[in-house]
Image (cartoon, rainbow, N blue to C red):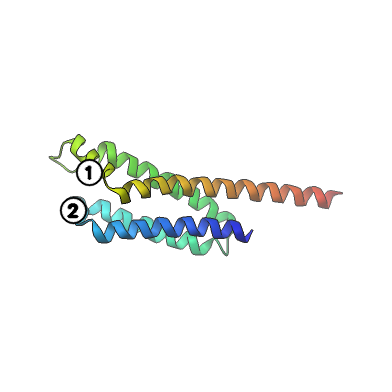
Amino acid sequence: MNKLRTAISAVLLVSAIVGAVILKTDAWLWAAAPSHAYGLIVFVVVDLGLAAIVWRATRLALLGSALLGAVQFTAMAGDVFTGQPAGMPASLWQQYLLGDAYFVALLALQLAVIAVAVLGLTYRRTMNSAVIKTLER
């Protein structure tokens, strides 16, 4: 169980770090789309919170992590296709985002967050089923 907690905490912490790096280094994000920057702040804070909560309420944190990863991935992918600032051509915006290694890394990390959380939930369910079967004997 500690390996599971460590894995989800690590993925969430890396996601928070990459998000924080984007917030610190991407001045254009702050200038052109401050609402997106504020949204990223929320994601970073929730990542950190879930990374801590997983040690006390594992199932809740795993569910929250899967949901957070899905929401953040959807929001970021949506930004690529429809989130360009007013007056900017969509192709230029897409080129900007997909050319940013931190953005692409954060996008991929959300898939890792979802995968680790779903694997963790599956593992917990399997372990709980095994314990119940053992107790029934």
Counting other residues with Cα less than 10 Å from the Cα at mark 1, is it few (<14), some (14-19), or many (20 or more)? Answer: few
Furthest residue to the right? Answer: 137
**12 or 53, which is in the foreground?**
12
Give the CA separation, mark 2 to mark 1. Answer: 10 Å
Q: Residue furthest left?
A: 87
Residue position marked by numbered label 1 in the rendering = 96
Mark nearer the N terminus (2 vs 1): 2
The type of residue carrying mark 1 is: Tyr
What is the total number of numbered labels drawn onto the structure image?
2
Q: Which mark is residue 106?
A: none
User: As displayed, is residue 25 above or below residue 77?
Assistant: below
Q: Residue at x 31, y 59 (%)?
A: 21
Residue occupying image coordinates x 24% and y 39% = 94
Q: Position of residue 122 (x, y in %)?
A: 62, 45
Counting from the top left corner in percent of width and height, residue 34 is at: 22, 54
- Quarter containing the N terminus: bottom right
- Residue 27 image offset from top left, x and y in percent: 19, 57
Instruction: Determine contact: label 2, label 1, CB under 8 Å.
Output: yes
Task: State the residue at coordinates (37%, 46%).
Answer: 107
Q: Position of residue 86 (x, y in %)?
A: 15, 41
Q: Secondary structure at mark 2?
A: helix
Is 89 left or right of 24, judged from the image as shown? left
Q: Say left or right for 45 vs 101.
A: right
Residue drawn at x 37%, y 55% as measured from the top left:
43
Residue 28: which numbered mark, if any?
2
* Element type where label 1 sits in the image: helix
Q: Which of pointers 2 and 1 indicates the residue nearer the eye?
A: 1
The 10 Å Cα crowd at callout 2, few under 14, some 14 to 19, many 20 or more, is: few
The kind of residue tagged 2 is: Trp
Above or below: residue 77 compared with residue 60: above
